[in-house]
Amino acid sequence: MPKILLVEDNDLNRDMLSRRLRRRGYEVVMAFDGPQALSAAASAIPALILMDMSLPFMDGWEATRRLKANPDLCEIPVIALTAHAMEGDRQRALDAGCDDFDTKPIEFERLLAKIESLL
């Protein structure tokens, strides 16, 4: 199964989501902040990135812009994961380079459908 980079700074969210993805057969690589996301993406070359937008050191908006500006990484689909559900947040994620957007708390089956459609 494909490799997914899960970028999430919340331990509970990261643990829950990574376990559910692994049960579905995905290989999961994790990062805890924006700089780690860039490093992990470059070394692991995942098939897809789940990007929390509220991260320490470098937020997910900036990390996604940098990923999409890198010719070696720009083709990797990114799904924004955010508790920001205000009008305009979806467009802001798409403008940053995300390929899709999902809100927290995560509805796993909905997220899984988005993952599968991008892979």
Image (cartoon, rainbow, N blue to C red):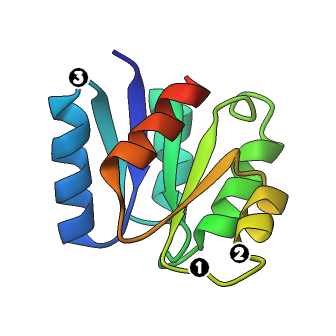
Q: Position of residue 87 (x, y in %)?
A: 73, 81
Q: CA distance from mark 2 to mark 1?
A: 6 Å
Q: CA distance from mark 2 to mark 3?
A: 30 Å
Q: Is residue 67 above or below residue 88?
A: above
Q: Which residue is disc 1 drawn over? A: 85
Q: Are marks 2 and 1 in contact (CB under 8 Å)?
A: yes
Q: At numbered mark 3, what does the secondary structure look like: helix, strand or loop?
A: loop
Residue 89's disc number? 2
Name the residue nearer the viewer: 47 or 83.
Answer: 83
Residue 25's disc number? 3
Q: Amino acid at mark 1?
A: Ala
Say few, some or many: other residues with alpha carbon within 10 Å of mark 1 (under 14 / 14 to 19 / 20 or more): few
| Tag nearer the camera, 1 or 3 | 1
Q: Is residue 89 above or below residue 68?
A: below
Q: At numbered mark 2, what does the secondary structure look like: helix, strand or loop?
A: helix
Res. 58 visible in picture: yes
Name the residue nearer the viewer: 12 or 58.
Answer: 12
Q: Position of residue 64 (x, y in %)?
A: 68, 55
Name the residue nearer the viewer: 11 or 84.
Answer: 84
Q: Amino acid at mark 2?
A: Asp
